Structures are given as C-alpha cells and as structure tokens.
Amino acid sequence: MVRWVRPLTSRLDETAETLGAKAHGLVTLHRLGLPVPPGFVVTTEACRTFLRRGRLPDGLHAELATAMRGLEDATGRRFGGTRTPLAVSVRSGASVSMPGMMDTILDLGLTTEATTALAAETGDAWFALESRSRFLSTLAAALTDGTALAGGTALAGGTALAGGTAGRDTADGQAPPTSEITAIEAVIERRSGRAVPDDALAQLTLAVETVFSSWDTPRARTYRELHGIPHDLGTAVIVQAMVYGNRDEHSGTGVAFSRDPNTGENVPFGDVLFGCQGDDVVSGRSPTRPLRELGSREPAVWAALVDALARIERHDRDACYVEFTFQSGELWLLQARPGRFVGAAAVRVATDLADEGLITRQEALLRVSPRHLRHARTPRMAPSARADILARGIGACPGAAVGKIATTTDAAIRMSVDGPVILVRPETSPHDMAGLAAAAGIVTARGGAASHAAVVARAMAKPAVVGIGDLTVESTGIRTAGRVIDAGTLVTIDGTSGEVALGSRRIVTDTADAHVRRLLAWADDVSGDRSDREEAERLAAAHAALRRARSS
C-alpha cells in the first residue's frame, strides 16, 4: 500500500526526490543532534498524484489524522485543543530549492477555541490573537495567490493582512480586537470564495491542497523555466510544530549563512528580527538587523547557532544557509541547505574549504563553474567626485548595472525590450519573478541581505541594493532624500557599495584576487596546460581533465 506521509526523524532514510530537499535537510539536522521542531512530511508523489487527479490521493486524509496524533504525543499538546493547543507550520519543499516560490502557512490549527486557549495558557492575549491573525494572513495569501492582500487590511496590533507583523508596536500593548480578525476572515471568504474552516484538521487538509496547488502558479513556473527545473517534480509539504518568534522579548527569527555570500569570508552572515516570525525576514517587508546583533542580545542563542553552522559545514563539506527561530531563548532550526554562492564568493569558499582540509583541490575545482569565474571579477561603479548619489542601501549582490528605472514587473518586462532596466520595488515577492528576470539590476526600499530580493539576485548573479530606508516607490517613479525621480530615468547601481547614482556612471572591473589566482594555478596543474588563455577556458580544461581521469 502506498504511504503518503513520513515522520521527520533521524531514522527516515529516503531521497530528496521523495521527501523534498527541505525535509531531507531536516532529517540530516536530526542526525546531527541539532534542534528541529517535530513534524512530518507529505511526499512529492502525493503532490504529483494531486496534480494529475485534481484531488488529494486516496488515504491521505486518514494518514494526516494519524500523523497529527503522533505529533500531539511528541509535543504533549492538542491540535486545535481547548487546553495547551498545538499549532503547526505548513511549508513547501521541492527536491530542488525554489526560494519563496510556493506557499507557506503559519500558526495553522489556531481555531477560535484554540486561540482563546492559547491566550489563557500564556496569559498573553496579544500573542494569541496576533498568532491567529498571522494564520489568517498567510492562509489568505495562499488561497488567493496574494490577491486578498491588496489594500493591506491592518490590525491594531501591528499585524497587516498585507504581510504580517513588525512586532508589538501598539502604544498600549493591547491585543488586536477580535472584530478586526473577523473582518480579515470576511475578506478571505469574499475573495477566495470559501470560509476559513474552524476545525483544525480541515484547516490542515485545505493547507496541503493549497501548497500542492502553488506548484503550478505562474511565479513558480517562471522560476522553473529560468533555472531549468522540470515541471513534473512536484513539491513535498512539511508540517511541523510551531515555534514562536513572536512569543516574548527573548524570541525572534532570522536567516544565517555560515560564510559571507558576497565575499566568501569565513564569518557568519545574515539577518535577524526580534519579536517576529520567519516570513518577516525572508519577505523583506520588515527592516532587519545584522545577524551579529544576536550575539549581544541573546548570547546563548548565538552560541548555539554558531555551533550549528559549524557542524552543518563539517557534515556537508560546504558553506550552508539556515533559517531559524528562537523562542524564549531557545534555538530551533527550520531549514538548512548549501549556501550556493556565486562569483568571487564561490571561488573563495572552494579554495578556503580545500585549505581547511574539508575538500580536495580537485573537488574545489569542480565546485567552481566557468560562469562563477566570469563573475569573479566584480564590476563596480568607478569612484567619482562628480557622481550624483541618489541613495545608499545595503549591497546585497556584488556587481554594477546601468538601466532605466522600472517600478513594476510589467514595466520592467515592457521596457527591457528597448534596453537594460533597473527594477525598483518597495520589496520583491515571488510575483515579481518575471520582472526580476527581465531586469539588469534590482533595488528595494525594504529588506536585508537575506530578503527575497537579495536571495533571488544572488541566484541570478544580478547586482542588487536593498534596504534604502527613505525610498518611496510609486507607479510614476521614486522619491528619495527629498527628490522625485521619474520612471524611465537612467541610473547606475553598485551591489557592493549599496549606492544608486543618477545617470550612466563609468563601471570598472576588479582585478583577479588571490583566491582566483590560486584556483587557476590548481587548474593548470590538473590540465597540464599553462598557455595564455582566458580564465574560464583554463578552468574548463581542468574540468575536462578531471572527467577523463574519472572515466579511465
């Protein structure tokens, strides 16, 4: 008999093709003894069956109920219960990473009664109602592909239907009124055509269907086409007990790279938010703090995170990326995957890992592609006293680009036919994928170095500047530092310095650094050819020699 659901434990021994890369990574974290919220995974085969038949596979509903009972036993809580209620996150996870392209639903299981029970258990009505509104917000986005979020129905407690919370920012600290939560439910029913179930298991079934359906959304299909990912893989669904980054003053969430993705330097790098949940960081909606601030505010969490990054690196023999939440001073890991650096950062990581003895020089050569090497000499905006700097933000992906300002995805696609464009947005989302693909560079008003815009820019090797605090984006243009700049105006951006300059500025390219020179010396040793050739050709010759050696 086909089994559609697997428990997330260290004993689970199946491939990423079945479990999805995210769940497969969580199994590895279990085996390393790292803290992972208990949960289970619905397989990619279940998704493929759903997409073929248009309904959930036979038997899946019963398996979900059984799996939830197991999760209740593991946590000592009750799903949708009237005492010690259990809430879960529901996340997508294909066998190939597609960051932000599919749906996530948080705090699922907080029915009306469970929300009341959570408030009674914690003595914190704000926390309970804010978590309930978070559930409704993420469900609304999933059910309507984002259309229910138009207009940004806001809650008094700082939560907005257009994108969650920035923490407890009310003057009196009171919870959002239940009337406003009821209003959100009405918006969902009106725009999606279905009422929010007030039964926890019904919510879970709906969420699984919705995440499966998000595999075929236009944004997901666009992403797969850009990255050469087959359309028939399907996604797994990971269900885990919620850990709350919004629980109290010692809670929060963040993303971390074990090494700097812009340079490859061996230092932890990322973003953190205090008193918030994970989608606030990766969406770019909220102004983040540098990861290093975690060390001063929550030293025990910082120490546990640094240890986890080191253990994952040693296991994977590669730089890594993790998403994490900490609740009341306790760290929990939600995802881990390879860092996937590009350009000079990829070269430095490969050579450093070889120096550290984690990989061989031959492995280091194979990890760097000729494309990485072509981007290793970073273009920058030439320094000039005459440069008219419009704005400064965070350099999120090295490189420089010149193009005309486009403030919407449609405009970027249309304008790119006549020349390079710079897509400028308040923040980007998966709905902007076509515009991101068309643009030569990316600028956002909000978000940090691990926001959606930054992650996608690095994957596409496109320069990006994020987190320009005083930038306002409108359909007709932008406003920054008291200046109004029309759409279609030519600008130059520098993804290293974080500068945006008016007009077309001169761009210069860095000379090859020591890491590139060392890698090329290794390449020449392998190929035996020291003739004067282009750098990417020297690396390609080494790759060919290594492949011949392996086949002989």
Image (cartoon, rainbow, N blue to C red):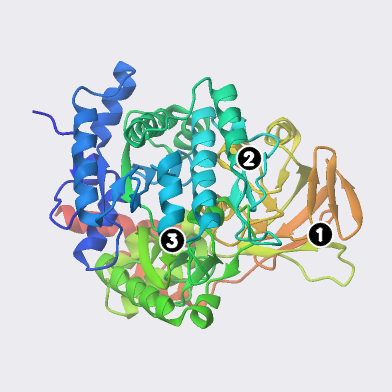
Q: Is residue 445 left or right of residue 342?
A: right
| CA–CA distance in space, label 3 to label 1 | 50 Å
Instruction: Select label 3 or label 1 by which is in front.
Output: 3
Q: Position of residue 320 (x, y in %)?
A: 38, 64
The answer to whether one can see residue 533 in this image is: no
| Disc 2 secondary structure class | helix
Q: Is residue 130 left or right of residue 19?
A: right
Numbered badge on residue 122: 3
Displayed quadrant of residue 201: top left
Instruction: Select label 1 or label 2 by which is in front.
Output: 2
Numbered badge on residue 501: 1
Q: Which residue is mark 2?
A: 180
**220 up-or-down from 459: above or below:** above
Q: Earlier in the sequence, mark 3 or mark 1?
A: 3
**52 up-or-down from 368: above or below:** above
The answer to whether one can see residue 420 in this image is: yes
- The residue drawn where x is 80% and y is 37% is 475
Q: Nearer the viewer, residue 69 or 91?
A: 69
Q: Position of residue 178 (x, y in %)?
A: 58, 42
| Disc 3 secondary structure class | helix
Q: What is the three-letter code of the residue carrying label 2? A: Glu
Q: Earlier in the sequence, mark 1 or mark 2?
A: 2
The N terminus is located in which quarter?
top left
Displayed quadrant of residue 19: top left
Q: What is the three-letter code of the residue carrying label 1? A: Ala
Q: What is the three-letter code of the residue carrying label 3? A: Thr
Q: Earlier in the sequence, mark 3 or mark 2?
A: 3
